[in-house]
Image (spheres, rainbow, N blue to C red):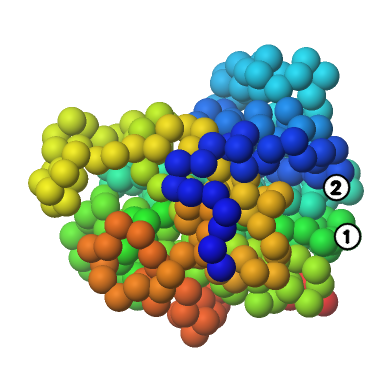
Amino acid sequence: MTGSFGEHATADEVLGQRDLSALRVLITGASSGLGLESARALAARGASVMLTVRDAGKAKAALEDVRAKAAPSATVEICELDLASFKSICALSGRLIAEARNFNVIMANAGVMACPQGQTADGFELQFGTNHLGHFLFVNRLVPLLVRNAPARVVVLSSGAHRRGNVDLGDPNFVCTPYDRWVAYGRSKTANALYAVALDKRLRDRGIRACAISPGAVGETALSRHLSQEDLERIRSATGRRPVFKTLTEGAATQLWATAVADADEIGGRYCENCSVAETITDPAATNGVLPYAVDAANAEALWTASEKFVGETFSWA
């Protein structure tokens, strides 16, 4: 599918004058960057938005920022969530289920990128554990809320970095292989794409569609806090040109397009970029497109099975 918006479409161009007052959206990792910009654009059009933040100290600032840029009366709520902790995930998801909260969109936006080697509270490599397993557990626990409010969508942020490597379910924590922060990030982003494939397969008949999106290279987010000038020079050397970054509002465009503009049946189970469904490619050095292993159904099922084992829960929603 080819979208009507280009690579540099902005959040406001994509959403236009839409009335989103019927939309109830949960966005993870929304204290800054793409999550906060998405919240602003949605709230400005009447959507009710819940933002999850890891740092409670940033919560008030995020709330004030959205209301100042959207509308003072915007319906915005902040909840604390650490996706690197199963305990934190279970606490918030349990509370939302108990309160019978209403959501018809979950945007799995939070993430860490190219960080030094570390572990989550539950012993998993930090990027795979946060970016994939944290969302796998959190979103899956909230599926009953989506089912009740169907039609609904799950928008999972992946990345062109998925082209750096397929998931390695035999060594997800880099026990047997030397840690490479970019390979680890790439694997986690492949996992994000595969999660959308498997989730969409399980829920499409219940009115819920899931997709993965790549926002493109965005230079104004906290995600890049671990990147040095030397890292940027390496990227330039590898590509033969200086990195061209999207602005924050351009970066948020595709996730907002997938949330409220794109046809759900066309994007369900797909990987999207630049406000359209991405082409499947074979060259990992390409700057756009999705590699086959990141949308492969068998690969997605293998990841799902392993992820249930890793988080210690199974999900069927019978």
**What distance separates the C-alpha of mark 1 from that of mark 2?**
8 Å
Q: Is residue 71 left or right of residue 60?
A: right
Mark number, residue 162: none
Q: What is the number of the mark on residue 102?
A: 2
Instruction: Measuring from the top left, give residue 201's x and y in whole percent.
Output: 66, 77
Q: Is residue 13 above or below residue 149?
A: above
The earlier-in-sequence mark between 1 and 2 is 2
Q: Which image quarter holds the C terminus?
A: bottom right
Q: Residue at x 46, y 65 (%)?
A: 278
Q: Is residue 120 left or right of residue 26?
A: left
Residue at the location (73% across, 72% down)?
A: 203
Direction front: furthest residue:
4
Residue 248: x and y in percent read 47, 32
The amino acid type, in three-letter code, at marker 2 is Asn
Does the rendering let one see residue 160? yes
Question: Which residue: 62% across, 34% down?
Answer: 12
- Vertical order, 104 against 203 (above or below): above
Label 2 residue SS? loop
Residue type highlighted by circle 1 = Arg
Using residue 223 as the reference point, say whether residue 58 is left or right of it.
Answer: right
Question: Do the residues under discs 1 and 2 have CB atoms within 8 angstroms?
Answer: yes
Between 88 and 58, the one lying in front of the other is 58
- Residue 229 relative to residue 203: left or right: left
Residue 61 percent coordinates (x, y): 61, 16
Q: Which residue is mark 1?
A: 148
